[in-house]
Amino acid sequence: MERSAVAAESAKGAGPQRSAPLTWAVAVAAGAFAVFALVRAFGLERGFPAVPLLAYTPYVLVAALPVAAVAAALRRWASAAVLALAVLVLAVAVVPRTVPYGITGAGGPQVRILTLNTLLGGVEPGGVVALVREHDVDVLALQEVTPALVEGLAAAGIGDVLPHTVDHSGTGAHGSSVHSVFPLTDLGDPGREIGAFHMARARAEVSGHRLEVVSVHPVPPVSSSAVRDWEEGLAALAELPEPGRAVRVLAGDFNATPDHARMRAVLDAGYVSAARVAGAGLTGTWPADGVLPRVAIDHVLVREGMGVGAYGVLDVAGTDHRGVLAEVSLPAPR
């Protein structure tokens, strides 16, 4: 009788530790997080839907933390160890974006750059011009620019504040443009060269310095065929020729985050994220509203050696993207 009571008490204490279904459930969860961490760490994302899913890496990190805690509480030590390793890998990738790091002042002229995806040209032109005035914008890079939006901006007085324009507008989501207080030279379009969305490339003359700006917009990776176009668009940015005596800024809707290997290749080509310098790398820019979690796919990337003195994200009516504003400084003359 006594032995039977001890056995019953022992079984009661073991409870969930002896539940095979629970063990398998925890193991499957650990395996899923481990695979995601491996894909992120080694840039193994391929095709759809893997590529768009990688944009949600910060959320996966947050989700992995309580699962690891549950695995440890249930004494599934193997699964807990796997989850702890996955959390570490993801944290190394994500957490540094929250810590300000980089050059805040390069000694040369300061330029305020605003980029915005206009959602098929659907923003109110007067609202865009008002933003330019309110934030003293020097260079404006727009995506999804239609000819009708260009006309609307002109009627709203964009020429009074940013008189110089490189117009690569187009139908639907294809168009882009660069508007500037400084004189501009049209340098072509890496998007058109690969038959993708237009990505206007312009050179501005800034107080004796040369600043090259690309209005970035690779095709969004929303299908298997679109992923290939997206890869080509980002590759075209990474392979842009050296700007000579100019310094270059890539500003726009990259449809990518630093969790994508293709985006990291662009950064490795000699660029620094303005958001990273400000410690705001996890500030989401899309969607501006709705049920999907917000991710940071709109960026201002500056050439190494440039400074970022200020950074902010703006809500704009009429588009599902938020605008990105960065005050950058050009390198001082040597």
Image: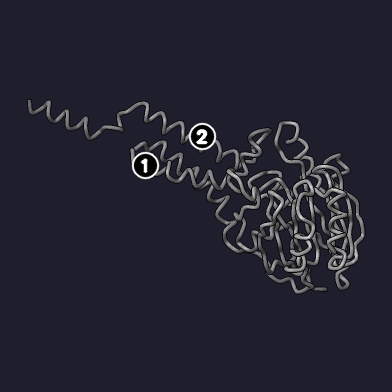
Picture coordinates of residue 60, whole percent (x, y) = 53, 43
Q: Measuring 16% from the left and 28% from the top, which residue is drawn there?
A: 7
Relative to 64, say whether 158 is above or below: below
Residue 290 — which label? Answer: none
Q: Secondary structure at mark 1?
A: helix
Visible in this render: residue 28? yes
Q: Measuring 76% from the left and 63% from the top, which residue is drawn there?
A: 113
Residue 32 — which label? Answer: 2
Q: Are marks 2 and 1 in contact (CB under 8 Å)?
A: no
User: Exactly how many numbered labels are in the figure?
Assistant: 2
Q: Measuring 75% from the left and 51% from the top, which residue is drawn there?
A: 117
Query: In this image, 8 relative to 43: left or right?
Result: left
- Look at mark 1 in the image and give the residue it sits on: 72
Relative to 48, say whether 105 is above or below: below
- Identified by mark 1, the residue type is Ala
Relative to 248, say whether 20 is above or below: above
Query: In this image, 69 relative to 50: left or right?
Result: left
Out of 48 and 319, give the one closest to the viewer: 319
- Identified by mark 2, the residue type is Ala
Query: In this image, 41 relative to 227: left or right?
Result: left
Q: Measuring 7% from the left and 25% from the top, which residue is drawn there?
A: 1
Q: Secondary structure at mark 2?
A: helix
Visible in this render: residue 270? no
